[in-house]
Amino acid sequence: MASLSRKGRRVARMATWALVAGSNVALRPSLWGIAFTQLLAFARQDWFGRPPYLPVPDMRYLRFRMETVYGNGDVMPPTRDLLEYLRWCRTQRRLWL
């Protein structure tokens, strides 16, 4: 079996991270609404017109965000950071409403 390319390994790692992170969010119903809101906020604008036809973020944007937060664009954030970020987003949204 041929080995995955660097991009393929990155996509596989991202898919694994998304599965673990999604499972953790699924266990916290209080975060479902803000998680969905943030997913749509980060999604490519043309997500409905390009495969995989899911509201996934642009990988270049995610790499930029990881570089600015963790100093390395290839880092997958710890799940606790994602959960804390979602809680922060929820709090900020409540302050604006």
Image (spheres, grey):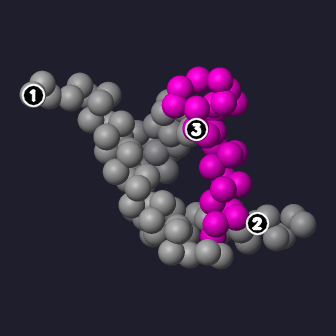
- Mark 2 vs mark 3: which is more N-terminal? 3
Q: Quadrant of the C terminus?
A: bottom right
Q: Which residue is pictured at 65% across the width and 76% down the height?
A: 30
Magenta region: which residues? 31-55
Residue hosting label 2: 92
Residue 23 in view? yes
Mark 1 surroundings within 10 Å by alpha-carbon count, few (fewer than 14), some (14 through 19), many (20 or more): few
Determine whether label 2 and label 1 are within 8 Å by CB. Answer: no
Residue hosting label 1: 1
C-alpha distance separating marks 3 and 1: 29 Å
Front-lying residue, 70 or 6:
6
Q: Quadrant of residue 2?
A: top left
Label of residue 54 in the image: 3
Q: Which residue is pictured at 52% across the width and 31% down the height?
A: 52
In this rendering, the answer to whether 94 lies above or below 19 is below
Q: How many marks?
A: 3
Q: Secondary structure at mark 1?
A: loop
What amino acid type should be assigned to the residue bearing mark 3?
Leu
What amino acid type should be assigned to the residue bearing mark 1?
Met
C-alpha distance separating marks 2 and 1: 48 Å
